Image (spheres, grey):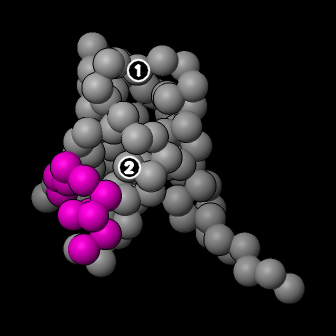
Amino acid sequence: MGQPISVVRTTVDGDVAAFHTDRGITGQDGAAFVSGDEATGTGSLPGNLAARLFAADDAVSNVFIVSNQVVGSRAGGWDDPSLAAISETITTFFVFYAEA
């Protein structure tokens, strides 16, 4: 149940990476988070995604989600494994398959 979100482009500039998706995750009002605990406490869709992003990579220090963009800051910059982990977390966010 649910469809994957496609990450159509990723832009990296130093410690910041922007993941551009094929669908909106929020409205025009963005949501910013500095920790998994803060994100989890909101109970919102962007908060839930941010919490998963913090859990996927301990070096992520900030997440901002607006419309179809997910922007993350990562101490020490981004490498291929960290980009892949965050991209996979975004891609599978809407996917849920219940055990039969």
Give the structural element (helix, strand or loop) at label 1. loop
Residue 46, placed above or below residue 89: below
User: Residue 8 or 40: which is nearer the viewer?
Assistant: 40
What type is the residue that disc 1 sits on?
Trp
Placement of the N terminus among the 4 image quadrants: bottom right
Q: Residue at x 54, y 19 (%)?
A: 80
Mark linked to residue 78: 1
Is disc 2 in contact with disc 1, using a CB cutoff of under 8 Å? no
User: Residue 82 or 29: which is nearer the viewer?
Assistant: 82
Residue underneath mark 2: 54
Residue 72, placed above or below residue 12: below
Q: From the top left corner, tell me how far across and down residue 88 is, in percent.
A: 58, 43
Residue at the farthest left position: 29
Q: Residue at x 31, y 58 (%)?
A: 36
Placement of the C terminus among the 4 image quadrants: bottom right
Q: From the top left corner, tell me how far across and down residue 17 is, in percent.
A: 33, 27
Task: Find the magenta span and give its range.
Answer: 31-41
- Examine the structure image and report whether residue 36 is included in the region drawn in magenta: yes
- Taking the image as drawn, is residue 23 in sight? no
Q: From the top left corner, tell me how far across and down residue 9 is, in percent.
A: 46, 27
Q: Earlier in the sequence, mark 2 or mark 1?
A: 2
- Examine the structure image and report whether residue 79 is included in the region drawn in magenta: no
Q: From the top left corner, tell me how far across and down residue 85 is, in percent.
A: 55, 37
